[in-house]
Amino acid sequence: MPIQANQMSVHEILEMIFQNKWLFLFCTAFGLLISIGYISRTEKWYSSRADIQVVDRNSSEPLLRGLGVTTSVAARFNAVRARILSPNNMEKFVAEIQTENKESLRKNVNETNRLPNLGDLKKDVAAKILSSSIGLGVANGIIFVTAECHSPHEAQFIVDRLQARVRDELMNTREDRLRDAQSVLKGLLDEYSDKLKKSEEFLRDFEVYNQVELFEGREQTLEQSIKLQNAMPGGATGGATSLVGRSTALSEKTSENEIKLKTLQTRLKATQEQIKKEPEFSVSSYTSEPSATNKQMESLVAKSEAELALLRQNRTSEHPLVQEKEAEVRELRAKQAQLSTPVIRQEQKVANPVLAQLKMQEANLRTEIDAMEQEQIVLIKQIKELHERIKTIPGKELEKTRIKRELTILTSTYQNIRQRFEDATLTGKIENEDRQTFSTLTPATFDASPTKPKKEFIYIMGLFLGMTVGVVLCFLREFTDTTFRNLEDASRFLDLPILGVIPEVSGPQSKRPSHRRGHAV
């Protein structure tokens, strides 16, 4: 019957593998054969390594001291490593290897070995730059060089050449540091040159503006300082008032403005009192006159009444003409009553002209007061500025002394940097040329056994994969088998108790390969 994996125990699994042992052993052996074939077909890589010790006797050089230029072994090595392992430099390195005498390779190769092909060597080196087949590192002042190649002698040769290249690059860092120092010194020289020019210009402008060079000593009094200011352009000798005179004049003008301001405020107050007393409007009366329509209607009524009177003289009141004229007169009088307006006397309010004049006068006074107050603010500000200027006159001598001292320091620093820059430019090198020494701790050696591929790992992986495939195939074979192996399988499958068992019957069928099937229901 098909086996249910969730009902199998470890013992049953082992029994299943044992019953299919030939299939399991075949898969395991096949995995080992695949591992052996992979190892035999994979290219072998050999590694080589050399160690260089860098002795830094003095890490501070007089030219570079205090300039912030990094001179440690690790920092210089990082720059060297980046240059050596760059693609362009590696191409030059391979080209140099090609120009080497091929006999230098033949000395390290046995007669039975193949002579390395420099074309292949270039291809290997160029292709493995990014995969770290060539490695450079530093630790505790020791630089190590490693390389991996298909031939151990090729790897050793590459390490020898790379070790020489590292030595040359480290020696070339002297010139780089010297150029860095010259660049730093040139930048400092330009910076202090600009500072020196600005300080000289500032001192010159300070002396011209304040005339501090006329001071003879620090015992200069405030009165003498004021006299000095009076002698300056704009002072008493220049046709204008001195600082004190200007301050006095401004104070007097401020007092005058204060008096004028109080006068204007008094007038404004009186005007406001008059405005309160004056009424806002004045009353005027007039009599209305009859309108033109009313006058015309009166004339028509008068004319009709005259005609009626003339008719009554010759006719009686019952005469049709008289009655018609009377009706006309009544109609005209009715119309006159509707059109006529009574003559009445009316009063009208008009703006008080005196009040308007007072308000205009009030607005003018307010404008003058505002202008006077603004002028007072400006005058007070000017007086304060003059007082502050007078107070700072004695301290300007100290300011000039400080500026001269800073100028002297800047001049000394500029001359020092200029001298150091000229020394670096003339000598063209750092003072102590023998500051670094190199010693080879471990020469370039190679391992006889290849580093790649790793045989043990590949064998283990092949064995593991073969066993895994064998177990999987054993499971598949058992899952596709529809016979029962024992009574428990039948009882578990049918969910019925076992009542009896038919033993095996000897016969031709007992010799079939599946003799392990011993029971049937």
Image (cartoon, rainbow, N blue to C red):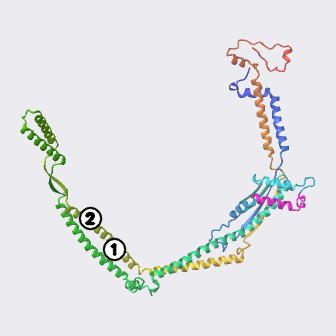
Question: In percent of the image, x 79 and y 19: which residue is there?
Answer: 517
Q: Quick one: 293 or 90, which is closer to the camera?
A: 293
Residues packed near mark 2 inside 10 Å, few (<14), some (14 to 19) or many (20 plus): few
Q: Is residue 454 visible to the viewer in this orientation of the structure? A: yes
Residue 133, percent across and down? 78, 53
Q: Judge left or right: residue 341 versus residue 53.
A: left
Between circles 2 and 1, the one closer to the viewer is 2
Q: In this view, does 135 lie above or below 496?
A: below
Q: In which quarter of the image is residue 96?
A: bottom right
Can residue 65 be seen here? no
Label 1 crowding class (10 Å Cα cut-off): few <14, some 14-19, many 20+?
some
Decide: is 1 above or below 399.
Answer: above
Q: Which of 310 and 35 is in front in this view?
A: 310
Q: Is residue 443 magenta?
A: no
How far from the left and from the top, in percent, is residue 287?
14, 52
Specify start and end residues of the magenta stretch as a single range. 86-108
Q: How far apart are marks 2 and 1 (CA)?
A: 24 Å
Task: Say what amino acid the circle numbered 2 marks.
Answer: Ala
According to the picture, the residue beneath numbered tag 1 turns out to be 379
Mark 1 secondary-structure assignment: helix
Q: Which amino acid does label 1 sit on?
A: Leu
Image point (17%, 46%), residue name: 296
In the picture of the structure, the residue carrying the numbered disc 2 is: 363
The percent position of residue 102, horizontal first and vertical second, equals: 89, 60
